[in-house]
Image (cartoon, grey):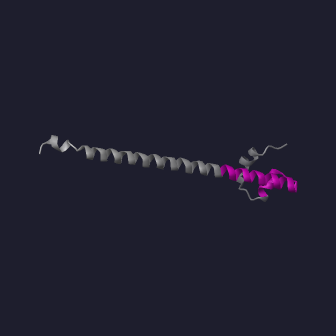
């Protein structure tokens, strides 16, 4: 057997290789899209959670007529998160 005969593949084998390559490409593309969608969902949940907290802070402030700091403490929001919510709630 010569080296040349080892390098030759049938058209059927070539088509199978192409099909496998396309399938892998499709799986890679689907996996990438899933990661992107998961990240978008997580981002959306985080934004929803923050908006919910802002609404809770405002409701406690208005309902009890207390400061933003007192409202955040009453809701047991971690002190590290206070600056983030202070920025999201403009004071009149």
Q: Horizontal and vertical percent for residue 9?
A: 22, 44
Is 69 displayed left or right of 29 in the figure?
right
Quarter holding the C terminus is top right
* Count of residue discs: 0
- Can you give x and y, in whole percent of width and height, for residue 38 in the image? 56, 51
**Residue 59, visible in the rendered structure:** yes
Q: Extreme right residue here?
A: 65
What is the span of residues highlighted in magenta in the rendered image? Answer: 46-73
For the residue pair 56 and 10, the one nearer the viewer reads as 10
Magenta span contains residue 56: yes
Q: What secondary structure characterizes most of the magenta part?
A: helix
Is any atom of residue 80 visible in this view? no
Residue at 87% across / 56% down in the picture? 64
Please state the horizontal and vertical placement of residue 52, each as a whole percent of the image: 73, 53
Residue projecting furthest to the left: 1
Q: Is residue 31 magenta?
A: no
Task: Please tell me which residue is depicted at 74% across the width and 53% down the height of the picture.
Answer: 53
- Left or right? Give the position of 26 relative to 8: right
In the rendered image, the residue lying farthest to the front is 12
């Amino acid at each position: 057997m010569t080296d040349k005969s080892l390098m030759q593949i049938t058209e059927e084998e070539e088509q199978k290789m192409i099909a496998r390559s396309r399938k892998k490409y499709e799986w890679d593309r689907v996996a990438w899209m899933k990661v992107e969608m998961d990240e978008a969902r997580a981002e959306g949940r985080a934004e929803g959670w923050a908006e919910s907290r802002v609404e809770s802070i405002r409701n406690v402030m208005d309902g009890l007529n207390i400061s933003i700091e007192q409202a955040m403490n009453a809701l047991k929001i971690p002190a590290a998160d206070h600056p983030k919510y202070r920025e999201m709630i403009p004071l009149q």
